[in-house]
Amino acid sequence: MCGRVAVRWAAVNIDAQCGTVVNMERIMHSPGEAAKITGLSRSTIYRYLGTGQLPSVHIGRRRLIAHKDLLAFLSNPKAGARESS
């Protein structure tokens, strides 16, 4: 039996026979989700958002971080590190 699935902010692969979702990868994350993914605190995520080191978009009242931007941020840890004085 096939069902319907509502999806927001996700790339979806659909089963060709019945049209159901077989794989779903989020393409946008809230700052709280980004904190869980990275292991950083929400405050740290917001600090990087505020400095522009981690790009985000505002959609309505929500602030969202693209998954690709989060991966790019994580792949270059020195970009987010504080400079020593």
Image (cartoon, rainbow, N blue to C red):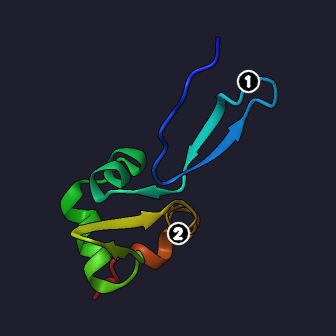
The reply to whether dot 2 and dot 1 touch (C-beta < 8 Å) is: no
Q: Residue at 71%, 36% (x, y): give it.
A: 14
Disc 1: which residue = 18
- 19 with respect to 51 (left or right): right
Residue drawn 32% across the image and 83% down it: 84
Dot 2 alpha-carbon crowd within 10 angstroms: few under 14, some 14 to 19, many 20 or more: some
Taking the view exactly as shown, the residue that stands out farthest to the right is 16
Callout 2 amino acid: Asp
Secondary structure under the numbered disc 2 in the rendered image: helix
Residue 20 quadrant: top right
Instruction: Indicate which disc, 2 or 1, sits on the residue closer to the N terminus.
Output: 1
Residue beneath disc 2: 69
Residue at left offset 29%, top offset 68%? 63
Quadrant position of residue 81: bottom left
Q: Amino acid at mark 1?
A: Cys
Mark 1 residue element: loop
On screen, residue 10 above or below 28: above
In the rendered image, the quadrant that contains the N terminus is top right
